[in-house]
Image (cartoon, helix red, strand yellow):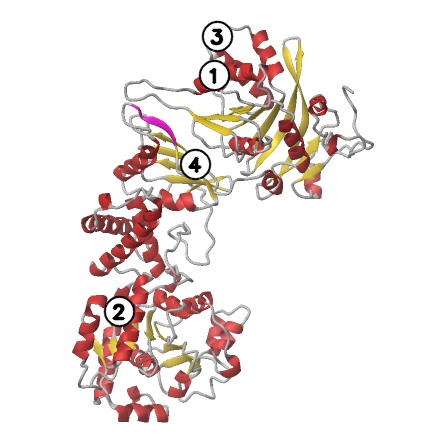
């Protein structure tokens, strides 16, 4: 098997310039020089079979052509070998273009798959890509080629068409250093010499004209009519010698491994990074990161990670020399994309001038976008923040960036260039919101423009370099239906919680870190009826309420002199003077818990808040502890009385071991029995087992009791949810059907048959 091939794409911006004739003879010349067959791929789909005619192979290709290959259900190397046509006397194999009924649309991905297979069989490949425009097929050819030969003749229309093609390729960020102009019929016109044509393209291609073929109409016409290429004739002829010189120039071009090239199936820029690991090839599954210790920075295909780093530093330095970023309108969102477009073109020009060659246009675009992110945005974090599947980004120093995807931690293939670049990104995060971070204040909570929560810790507190934790804010706000759809809750649970919010019950949402408390709080806040005056209080504003009457408050840290701090507790106290109908506190962590409980007990019912806890009962203990943190010496019995009378419902959310998030408990606070706060479950998620893939199997169950809080629904005029009506069979929503083996794992209690005939009613 061949690991890399010398791929030459012959193209023409205008018909009648002899591109197919040139491709034909170059393929034969490469075969003769390397003493191995060259694969000649005929993509001249308009003519259909021109290469077969030039080689007198019309009969052989009637049933063996590209149409058969692309029409095959699963084309592979065996299919390719069966459809290629070998010339009897010349070292060339032909994949002919279909003609007549054999013609059919060909996609860019199909062509790429063909080139990957051909790459494994042939050391030299010539593509006759006489496409009518810079479409996806020609784009794939350019991406995968060692060199591209636009054919031009001494004709002003040919020059203009070729110039337009090259400018279009440049505007779409194809690497122009791959293009090498070939002048056919160079001495056709005394008015336009080959030197003048070379000068015409000198500034654009940044290289002198090297390749030309003389005008020999007798030899050319004779070769075409007889189907005998000129490379079969005497080597003393001028035209043959010119082809020989061209072949020698092509043999100096480095081969390419097509499987390592990331193609772009669109001809529009920019390209968004798919964040593939550096070692991943197209079509290969992204490996799961098990040992999260050694993952290299994303490297350009064909380069090492260190070479990629050095080139990026070089280009970044050159960009700063060429452009004054400080004078550009980077703070204006309307102008920002225009600035990026200008800098994108400037970087492409710098790469061409400095002869920085990248085989793939897509890789070049990705490199340019990374440089723009470093110059204008948050550097390597930009692509991760744009990825909708990534929910959290964690930076542990400049060399390690972890991400959370689908609830699982992975080590990304992104890195900062150094600690200095990391600190520049940190400054860009905190500066727009008026926060500061330095050695005297080495910790900060901040937020991005989209509302994502950011925590930053820098040395001397962070020993291995600055640490950033970003909890991403989803671009599309999740709704209750989304939670039902992904299995986080049941429809009955959502209907009950909606009614509870409308009935002005005080609700505490608890759970561990990253369990989805804020997301659930956001959804439950949306149940508050329009017209209510709502005050939200947060450390970093994340809640998105769509009601009209909302006042958003955010805490503030101390300034350089250690003054001016406004804590959550201060905002809770102040909110009581703002005539709120509902108070929503993002999270209670300390003494503000006492003020929140007092607000709930003094006419501000219907309030919502969250706290960290691993179970509903632990949430009550946490509230006791936080009340004691207020500095007011209260007996435990008095604190528990406050909690029991203030909190009506506790909703607990957990992140399970497989990364899924579920509301595992909806619990009502019933009151006090002695010194103990009594609770009872209304809804509960029961985990039963874990399947072979590590997925948690469980089910939601509704308790067979009537909650006390339903009396509050009746008093508020809220209809009691249907699941609590007499005769309603409790809903059991299971993650997926249990296998017999999984059923054997259930406890004897869980294997008891369901009770039929309604509920056991309590309290009514």
> Rounded to the nearest whole Å, what is the CA distance between mark 4 and mark 1?
26 Å
Could you say which disc has been placed on residue 573 in the image? 1
Which numbered disc, 1 or 2, marks the residue that appears first in the sequence? 2
Q: Position of residue 48 (x, y in %)?
A: 44, 82
Residue lying at 66% horizontally and 43% vertically, measured from the top left: 736
Q: Which residue is mark 4?
A: 452
Which numbered disc, 3 or 2, marks the residue that appears first in the sequence? 2
Q: Position of residue 710 (x, y in %)?
A: 71, 24
| Nearest to viewer (mark 4 / mark 1) | 1
Residue lying at 46% horizontally and 28% vertically, measured from the top left: 552
Q: Which class describes the residues within 10 Å of circle 2: few (<14), some (14-19), or many (20+)?
A: some
> Rounded to the nearest whole Å, what is the CA distance between mark 4 and mark 3?
35 Å
Q: Which residue is mark 2?
A: 253
Residue lying at 20% horizontally and 76% vertically, measured from the top left: 197
Residue 442 in sight in this render: yes
Give the magenta-colored segment's residue range: 441-446
> Rounded to the nearest whole Å, what is the CA distance between mark 1 and mark 2?
74 Å
Q: Which residue is mark 3?
A: 632
In what element is the residue under mark 2? loop
Q: Which one is in front, 272 or 42?
A: 272
In what element is the residue under mark 3? loop
> Rounded to the nearest whole Å, what is the CA distance between mark 4 and mark 2?
48 Å
What secondary structure is the stretch in magenta mostly built from? strand
């Amino acid at each position: 098997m061949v690991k890399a091939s010398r791929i030459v794409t012959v193209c023409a911006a205008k018909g009648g310039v002899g591109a197919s004739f040139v491709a034909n003879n170059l393929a034969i010349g490469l075969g003769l020089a390397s003493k191995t067959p060259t694969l000649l791929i005929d993509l001249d789909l308009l003519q259909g079979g021109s290469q077969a005619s030039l080689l007198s192979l019309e009969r052989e290709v009637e049933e063996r052509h590209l149409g058969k290959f692309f029409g095959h259900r699963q084309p592979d190397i065996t299919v390719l070998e069966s459809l290629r046509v070998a010339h009897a006397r010349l070292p060339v194999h032909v994949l002919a273009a279909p003609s007549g009924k054999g013609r059919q649309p060909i996609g860019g991905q199909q062509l790429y798959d063909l080139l990957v297979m051909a790459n494994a069989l042939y050391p030299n490949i010539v593509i006759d890509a006489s496409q009518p425009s810079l479409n996806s097929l020609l784009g794939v050819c350019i991406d995968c080629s060692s060199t591209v030969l636009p054919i031009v003749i001494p004709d002003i229309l040919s020059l203009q068409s070729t110039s337009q093609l090259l400018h279009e390729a440049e505007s779409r960020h194809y690497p122009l250093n791959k293009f090498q102009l070939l002048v056919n019929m160079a001495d056709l016109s005394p008015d336009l010499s080959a030197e003048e044509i070379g000068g015409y393209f000198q500034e654009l291609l940044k290289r002198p004209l090297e390749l030309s073929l003389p005008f020999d109409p007798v030899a050319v016409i004779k070769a075409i009519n007889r189907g005998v290429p000129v490379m079969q004739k005497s080597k003393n002829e001028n035209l043959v010698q010119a082809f020989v010189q061209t072949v020698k120039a092509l043999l100096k071009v480095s081969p390419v491994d097509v499987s390592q090239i990331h193609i772009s199936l669109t001809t529009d820029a920019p390209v968004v990074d798919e964040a593939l690991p550096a070692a991943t090839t197209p079509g290969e599954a992204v490996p799961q990161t098990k040992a999260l210790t050694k993952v290299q920075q994303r490297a350009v295909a064909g380069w090492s990670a260190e070479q990629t780093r050095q080139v990026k530093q070089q280009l970044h330095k050159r960009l700063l020399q060429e452009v004054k970023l400080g004078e550009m309108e980077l703070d204006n969102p309307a102008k920002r994309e225009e600035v990026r477009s200008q800098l994108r073109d400037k970087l492409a020009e710098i790469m061409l001038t400095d002869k920085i060659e990248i085989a793939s246009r897509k890789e070049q675009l990705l490199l340019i976008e990374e440089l723009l992110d470093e110059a204008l945005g948050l550097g390597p974090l930009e692509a991760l923040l744009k990825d909708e599947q990534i929910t959290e980004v964690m930076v542990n120093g400049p060399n390690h960036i972890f991400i959370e995807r689908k609830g699982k931690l992975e080590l990304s293939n992104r890195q900062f260039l150094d600690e200095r670049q990391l600190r520049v990104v940190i400054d860009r995060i905190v500066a727009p919101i008026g926060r500061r971070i330095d050695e005297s204040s080495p910790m900060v909570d901040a937020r991005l423009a989209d509302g994502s929560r950011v925590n930053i810790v820098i040395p001397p507190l962070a020993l291995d370099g600055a640490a950033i934790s970003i909890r991403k804010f989803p671009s599309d706000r999740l709704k209750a239906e989304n939670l039902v759809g992904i299995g986080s809750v049941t429809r009955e649970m959502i209907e009950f919680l909606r009614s509870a919010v409308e009935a002005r019950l005080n609700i505490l949402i608890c759970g561990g870190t990253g369990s989805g408390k804020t997301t659930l709080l956001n959804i439950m806040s949306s149940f508050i009826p329009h017209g209510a005056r709502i005050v939200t209080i947060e450390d970093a504003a994340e809640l998105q309420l769509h009601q009209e009457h909302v006042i958003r408050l955010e805490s503030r840290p101390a300034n350089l002199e250690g003054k001016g701090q406004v804590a959550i507790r201060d905002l809770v106290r102040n909110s009581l003077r703002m005539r709120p109908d509902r108070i929503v506190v993002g999270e209670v962590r300390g003494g503000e818990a006492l003020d929140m409980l007092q607000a709930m007990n003094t006419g501000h019912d219907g309030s919502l808040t969250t706290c960290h806890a691993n179970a509903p009962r632990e949430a009550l203990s946490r509230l006791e502890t936080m009340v004691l943190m207020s500095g007011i010496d209260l007996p435990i019995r008095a604190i528990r009385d406050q909690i029991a009378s203030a909190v009506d419902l506790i909703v607990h959310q957990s992140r399970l071991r497989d990364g899924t998030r579920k509301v595992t408990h909806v619990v009502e606070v019933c009151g006090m029995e002695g010194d103990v706060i009594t609770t009872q479950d209304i809804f509960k998620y029961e985990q039963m087992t874990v399947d072979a893939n590590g997925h948690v199997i469980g089910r939601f169950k509704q308790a067979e009791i009537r909650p006390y809080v339903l009396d509050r629904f009746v008093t508020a005029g809220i209809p009691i949810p249907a699941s609590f009506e007499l005769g309603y069979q409790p809903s059991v929503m299971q993650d997926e059907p249990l296998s017999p083996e999984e059923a054997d794992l259930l406890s004897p209690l869980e294997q008891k048959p369901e009770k039929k005939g309604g509920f056991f009613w309590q309290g009514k």
